[in-house]
Image (cartoon, helix red, strand yellow):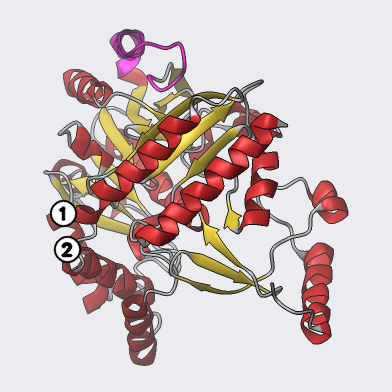
Amino acid sequence: MSRPDPDRDSARDRIVALDKRRVWHPYTAMDDYARRVDPLVIVRAEGARLYDADGRSYLDSNSSWWVAALGHGHPRLVAALTAQARAFPHVSLAGVTHAPAAELAEAVCALAPPGLEHVFYSDDGSTAVEVALKLALQYWGQNGRPERQAFVGLAGGFHGETLGCTAVSGVELFRQPFAGALAEVFHVPSPGELGVSLDHACDALAELLARKADRIAAVVLEPVVQGAAGMRIYDPAYLRVARELCDRHDVFLVADEVFTGYGRTGPMWACDHAGVAPDLLCTAKGFSGGMLPMAATLATQRLFEGFHGGAERAFYYGHSFCGNPLGAAVALEVLRIYEDQKVLAGIPAKAERIARCFTALESLPGVAHTRSLGMIGALDLSGAAGYLEQAGWRVFEEARRRGAYLRPLGNVVYVTPPLVIPDDDLDELLGIVSESVTAVAAA
């Protein structure tokens, strides 16, 4: 236990006071936060651990919202960032290019599912999906099908924070405040929903496309795992059906691999579980190893050529930091680390540890359902479901006392640690999860 340090305590109190006076936190009821929450004040992060102003360390069980796939402060990523900052930190990508952006695009396409040959850069997962939506709409608009203005999304899907992403997302709590301003989207049952069979989900998509394909620009989905919905895992066979139906009706398939990509489910891409290639693939989070906001949308040659034919057909979209050299240099180094350190090859053994832990927890009386895939483990606590339920937060508090940051999704407790978390740290984290869930279940 660390000794009291008045100077440190005073500095911490000052930061918390400033924070509560000025900072508006994401996904947070701010009145409750200001009144009740004692936040972690992080001063350092390394590997799988966060270090706070009180001198304690916490295992980062969700890779800081799923971004730190290689852990915090990987020395090679720090070195790549530093070297690029010394050369030039930013130039626009308008009529300009540079080695990090060009070489990264080549490297990503080499690892992508077949047929994805072009890369459009943006800032984060939301903008990567927004790019895909706009590409699909504009493609059809200037290639003979302007009536294709709608999208298909899955119930429980989550694709980001911009208005387009909010529209295709299927978490009603997040959609409802903006419902009157959203694009037309048809939501179909998800094969990841409890009580929804694979056949029913496939039939619902087939029936919708048979009736509405002439109005639909793209089907948008998170392949195999719906993260924000509560780590819903579904049969990859659904992806194969979705691909066949999109081909039959000539509708684009958009794979949102922002969370599932870069090895989170085991292979490089969750689409690999089904052996399918989308028309558009969105990547972020692990893309830059959690170092910087950086994202990409990968597209087929058909889509790319659909914007040829003069200035009036160009894609007029681009963020100020599109193709940022710092982010591109770091993202390129991420891929080199994956290859040099054989990151994907190390996942199965760690995934087995996660699976064993969560399978064992299913026998507890307060646990309703468990599942795991790759570097994801999740369970539903008994009782009402939903993002606003509080049971998971009781587990969060138990885990915090034991040295882990275990932010839940309502009544869903889950882990998504760095892919390279050391085995000792992983075992400690899983032990804390077991102890914390057991403590809440027994209460």
| Quarter where residue 25 is shown | bottom right
Where is mark 1, residue-wise?
111
Q: Residue at x 31, y 50 (%)?
A: 350
Residue 79: which numbered mark, if any?
A: none
Q: Position of residue 402 (x, y in %)?
A: 63, 55
Locate the C terminus by quadrant. Answer: top right
Look at label 1 and name its amino acid.
Answer: Leu
- Calculate the distance from the C-alpha at mark 2 to the C-alpha at mark 1: 7 Å
Look at label 2 and name its amino acid.
Answer: Ala
Question: Which of the two residues, 262 or 425, is positioned nearer the viewer here?
Answer: 425
On screen, residue 255 above or below 350: above
Q: Residue at x 33, y 90 (%)?
A: 87
Whether residues under marks 2 and 1 lie with C-beta atoms below 8 angstroms apart, the answer is yes
Question: Which of the two residues, 87 or 312, is positioned nearer the viewer here?
Answer: 87
Local crowd at mark 1 within 10 Å, few (<14), some, or many (≥20)?
few
Stretch in magenta:
191-213
Q: Position of residue 81 (x, y in %)?
A: 37, 81
On screen, residue 356 above or below 11: above
Locate the N terminus by quadrant. Answer: bottom right
Q: Position of 398 compared to 257: left or right?
A: right
Question: Which of the two residues, 27 or 63, is positioned nearer the viewer here?
Answer: 63
Local crowd at mark 2 within 10 Å, few (<14), some, or many (≥20)?
some
Where is mark 2, residue-wise?
107
Q: Main secondary structure of the magenta part?
A: helix
Asked if the magenta segment contains residue 185, the reply would be: no
On screen, residue 112 above or below 367: below
- Report if residue 347 is visible in the image: yes
